[in-house]
Amino acid sequence: MGSWTRKRMETLLKNARRAITNALAYLDIKEKIQRFGYDETKLLAGHALYKKAQSLYIARKTKWGLQLAATKDLIDLIDAVFVYYMEYAKLVRKRLKRNKEALTILGMNGRRALSLSGLITQATLFFQNLKDNQDLFNQVSDLGISQQVLQVGLDKLAALENEDEFHESVKGEAQDLTVERNKVFTELNDWMAEFETASRSALKDTPQRLEILGFIEYSEGYKPASSSKDDENTNTNPS
């Protein structure tokens, strides 16, 4: 089974709705497929599986929207924190460029961190230690760096950490939902495959009834060209 692309999921939902709904609605169809084990109870179970797949499909699209929004908010906040930090870090680095001990205390003796956790660590060392170390603070206070400036930096970092935790939470929920959705879609796909096989046997003498269920009756020996190639080669759309 290839990846569950949006096109494949929507196609399966459409086909399942048509097949199961019409099987329940047409008495003559229901009577014939019942001989192959598809009584009303089993059809209703299939319909419940279809509704569950539909619900998960919608829920995952909604969660994907929340994840996109959370990602945008996180990126915007990272940019804001980085700009604020660098505005003062550049001034302090130039002022204390010959004081390696001070630069180490402020987390500025080395390469600039590229990861989010690295940025948070370096910026926290800078704002917190500069705030707590009166001697270092006095050396740079004429650069427009006040206790309020430092506290604002710490508050921005706290907000960034909270946003990162929220983003990871939404991301995790979306991943869990994706796994559950794909599992249910696979179950529905298997159910539909078995149902189609049974229907073809039950309705082999009434091809028009097969078409009502959405199953086209092919001539003996005819194998239709695969129409799933584009799906198999399409990257999974998490929506």
Image (tube, helix red, strand yellow):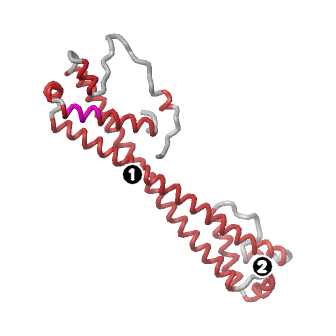
At x 81%, y 85%, the residue is 142
Q: Which of the 4 image quarters holds residue 27? A: top left
Under circle 2, the secondary element is: helix
Considering the whole magenta stretch, tell me its main secondary structure: helix
Q: Is residue 28 left or right of residue 54?
A: left
Magenta region includes residue 214: no
Q: Could you say where residue 181 lies in the image, as x and y percent from the top left?
A: 38, 46
Quarter placement of the N terminus: top left
Q: Is residue 110 left or right of residue 49?
A: right
At x 31%, y 29%, the residue is 193
The type of residue carrying mark 1 is Ala
Label 2 environment density (alpha carbons within 10 Å; few <14, some 14–19, many ≥20): many
Q: Is residue 165 left or right of residue 100?
A: left
Q: Residue 102 bears which disc, if any? A: 2
In the rendered image, the residue lying farthest to the right is: 98
Q: CA distance from mark 1 to mark 2?
A: 52 Å
At x 64%, y 79%, the residue is 152
Under circle 1, the secondary element is: helix
Q: Which of the 4 image quarters holds residue 22? A: top left
The type of residue carrying mark 2 is Ala
Identify whether 78 is placed above or below 44. below
Label 1 environment density (alpha carbons within 10 Å; few <14, some 14–19, many ≥20): some
At x 71%, y 68%, the residue is 83
Q: Could you say where residue 79 lies in the image, as x and y percent from the top left?
A: 66, 64
Label 1 vs label 2, nearer the camera: 1
Q: Residue 59 bears which disc, if any? A: 1
Q: Could you say where residue 96 lies in the image, as x and y percent from the top left?
A: 83, 78
Camera-side residue: 14 or 151?
A: 14
Q: Could you say where residue 124 lies in the image, as x and y percent from the top left?
A: 65, 74
Q: Please provide the residue range marked out in magenta.
A: 18-23
